Image (spheres, rainbow, N blue to C red):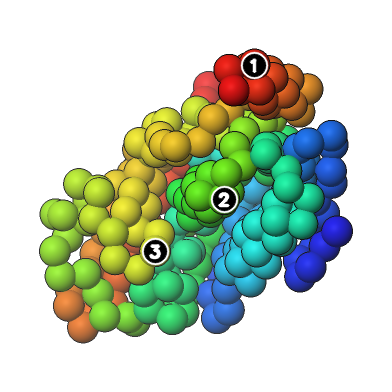
Amino acid sequence: MNAHGPIPILRVGSNLLTTVHIDLHDTVAEAFQQDVLLAIERTGATGLVIDITGLEEVDTYVARILADTGRMAKLMGAQTVVVGMRPEVAATLIRMGYMMEGVETALDVDEGLTLLIERQAKKRRST
Amino acid sequence: MVETVQSWEVPIAREDDIVLVRRKARALAQERGFDAFAAAALTTAASELARNVWVHAGGGKAIIEELTDGYRTGIRMTFVDEGPGITDVERVLQGGFSTARSLGLGVSGTRRLVEEFDLQTAPGRGTRVVIVKWTRF
């Protein structure tokens, strides 16, 4: 399901799951964002889980790429949850003053998918 | 008295070199017993500053030094470029000042991650940033 980049995007029910396991710098980051958006279009997914368990550090550049990806997905109608942030990464980002606004987070992939599925079920009930 | 045990110089000539600088800092921090929080703080600071060298000056270098004060290990990182320099230093140090993509919290945030921080710059004269992080007792 990959168009350009080295980061795989998997379909899990009505959601997408992607695990960022390599450094997100310029060329990789741009390909990643495009792959995510194209996958949303192709699958009609309404949710996206970005797993960052593998990232030992997240600087403000990478944090911004993750937040931007979430905002792009949201424009298309898909909700993003960033999961698996390590304790030292959370501590470092907050100490730097970075809030990663506009992005929801959850503990791990399970929690992230559960959150999306509950949200989608609620939406269906109300419509 | 603080002494330098050994040092390495890493050129920053391509975007990928940011990763090399960060990896070297991480490897050294882990070998010398920095905990996960201190190692993440140092490597994140290194990443921000190396990116600044790349984005704002188009290149430069990083010098990584292992320090000792007789009790603890420190890591000093010096980032040097011959780019345009910074005109409004106070504003950059206060943060929330964003020009080319990443700088918004880069410098001000980095300062909060390390024990020592020094910035020398002048318009047209390049920029030199020095940070030091020490192991805990």
Q: Chain of mark 2?
A: A
* Secondary-structure class at tag 2: helix
Q: Distance from label 2 to label 3 (Cα)?
A: 24 Å
- Whether B120 is drawn above or below A88: the answer is below
Q: Earlier in the sequence, mark 1 or mark 2?
A: 2
Residue sitting at x 79%, y 68% = A3
Which residue is the site of mark 3? Answer: B101
**Residue type marked 3:** Arg
* Labels 2 and 3 within one chain: no
Q: Nearer the viewer, residue B74 or A23?
A: A23
The image position of residue B8, as x and y in percent, is 59, 65
Judging depth in this view, the residue of B110 and B68 nearest the camera is B110
Quadrant of res A118? top right
Please give the residue where the numbered disc 1 appears in the rendered image: A125
Residue at horizontal 43 percent and vertical 81 percent from the top: B58
Q: Are marks 2 and 3 in contact (CB under 8 Å)?
A: no
